[in-house]
Amino acid sequence: MNLQMLGESKLVADLGWTLLHSFWQIGLVSLGVLIALRVLRDHSPNLRYALSTSALALSVLLPVITFVQASTNGEIVPSSVRSTTASGHRGDRHVLRIGESAVGEPQQPISIAGEGGSGLFAVLFRWIDRTLPDLLQIAVAAWLVGVAIFSLRLGGGFSRLRKYTTEGANEADAYWQHAFALLRNSAAVKRTVRLVRSELVQTPIAIGVLRPIIIIPASLFLQMSPRELEMIIAHELIHIRRFDPLVNLLQCIVEALFFYHPGVWWISGQMRREREFVTDAGVTQIFKDSYVTYARALANLEEIRLLANQQMPRYATAANGGNFMQRIQRILKIKPEASTANSAWTAGLALLLTSGFLLAIFSFSPSGLVNAERSLVTRKLAIGFVSIPPVDRTENPPKDSDATARLLIHKLKVHRVPATGFLQGGMISDGEKFFPVQTNIARMWIDAGFEVGLGGFNHMKLYNTNVDEYIANIEKNERVAKKLIGEMGLPPRYFSYPFLNTGRTVADKAKVEAWLASRGYTSVKYTFDNQEWMYSFAYDIARNDNDVNTMKEIRELYLAYLNKMFDHFEAYSTEMFGRDIPQTMVLTPSRLITDTADEFFGMATKRGYTFITVDEAQTDPAYKTKEDFTGVGGISWFERWTMAKGHRLREEPGVDASIVQTWDNREQKSKK
């Protein structure tokens, strides 16, 4: 069979008519879906997704039915064209006129435009009669070429995805494998799924139908908090539970077959959009009351995607798919359209302004990007250092302590952190005379413009100390502080309980608080307690041993630990107050803090924090919440407030085992 015979075959004619009819068929389906989605805009995304999926299936089914009808009885093809395309010789073909029967029996001719058939419509129909068969052949040829091109594109994408699973990919570490197993259970995923970290991809994706794999960019384990990353992984797990990779693959095949029809692309786009809404709803069901955290995770992911400028194949389901702004609005329950006529215009205006503002941020930032997270949430963080001057565990204490203090002051200035340092007088004086080197370190803090608060002259627990002796210890420190500060800086306003311990009994605590108030001092209520001091101790031991590898490992462990602690205390804030209250964080002025300052302050900024003074944080109404905690330990004020309300405490992230072991070894040595 030569090309001419193929071009004039019945199969080509049937395909041509199928393509022609598909335009109005799919067009009507698209119009129906548009109207239905508009009517159901306030209904669940599951219903809207089912509607979009059904519409795409119908868009495939109608042309198939058309082709079958054309192939079997030819009723959908005009008789004149059917005769034309069936003839091998154009010159002597027999044309069935519109007025003739399909079986060749003459009937009364029907005039198209006037009695003589010489009108405009007659001319038009004669032209169609002559040219349409050729046009259909061209259309089929163009369609075959288009399908071939889109199929090659589809195959190339498959090759890329296979490369992602084999090159630069390895299993996630033990911590994340454990977390992944828990997430699988939470997401009710019964199938076997692998979690892989990759150096090639820049955004998380879920691929595979029979053996699904979730691929996470290696950089994301450091760029996002564990809580945020868990939410992103849960998103991909829900895609797998719903068999979305398979559905997405079928969509891509449909798009390749109907590449010429904008209605198919639009319906398919609606499917992807609604699918992301459905999946987002599933994530918020797993992580209840974490809408802001999830929105922030998506914002971070969008920023990373824009920075990487990497496009995933359309059939790879990714957590940052769909319409980004609409997803954020839905997650945060920002309703784009009001339900009443009175508020419709204000809601529309608010949506317009919000969308325009965020679009401007993404489009016109000097760097081409900004942190979208900052547009979603603004948080505040105050930091208190206990105590100054820094504790030094090196073999050359004065020199190393001086270097640590200088580095810390420099980092605080660079990142514009108005920290407060709490003086421990016993480290710079015996009560009468000052130790020159250590005193100079403390004065550097004041000269740099940072506020000084009071601790104890000696670092002692109220729980183990007589109240009068405890107050005398503060008084002694007060005298040292006044001599040190003189006319140089702001007089102390805040007192930091050593070890955050507030005594054995409520009466003891009340007596100390009354004394502080009589002197014009306010005790600091730390919401963000943490075990940084254990990491700092282990870091100093590694420094003394010149163990560079262990130092690097401790820095990474510490930053990951802090990320979890941010999640922990942010959750407390949301649960107790329904908002992000200003946090007050306690740290030690250690070398670990200085060596991780850029990463830590960057992490806090990325989470939406701005740095404020202790004074500004403590004036928030949340800090007036009543509590009467006493005991041998010192705990966060979030935990104190929770206990006062009779609520259950959240499980706190644990310190890494290697750090605990280093600390335990220290205690064992001290007992010998």
Image (cartoon, grey):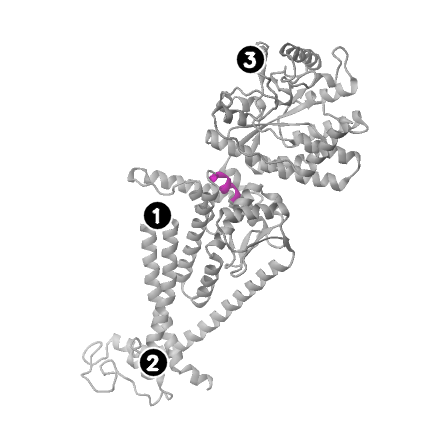
Query: What label sits on residue 507 in the rendered view?
Result: 3
In the depicted structure, whether residue 214 falls above or below residue 113? above
Residue 163 percent coordinates (x, y): 61, 61
Q: Nearer the viewer, residue 536 or 257?
A: 536
Q: CA distance from mark 1 to mark 2?
A: 51 Å
Marks 2/3: CA distance? 105 Å
Question: In the image, residue 169 lies at what x, y percent?
Answer: 63, 55
Q: Residue at x 44, y 65 (%)?
A: 254
Amino acid marked by disc 1 = His
Tell me the element at label 2.
helix
Which residue corresponds to mark 2?
130
Which dot, 1 or 2, sits closer to the camera?
Answer: 1
Tag 3: amino acid: Ala
Between residue 72 and residue 437, name the one nearer to us. Answer: 72
Nearer the N terminus, badge 2 or badge 3? 2
Q: Residues within 10 Å of mark 1 (few under 14, many from 20)?
A: few
Residue 655, located in which quarter of the rendered image?
top right
Residue at mark 1 = 43
Residue 319 visible to an observer of this rendering:
no
68 to the left or right of 287? left
Instruction: Look at 64% across and 38% down and name the residue there.
Output: 559
Residue 519 in magenta?
no
Mark 2 is on which residue type?
Arg
Asked which quadrant contains residue 356, the reply is: top left
**Which stretch is magenta?**
290-297
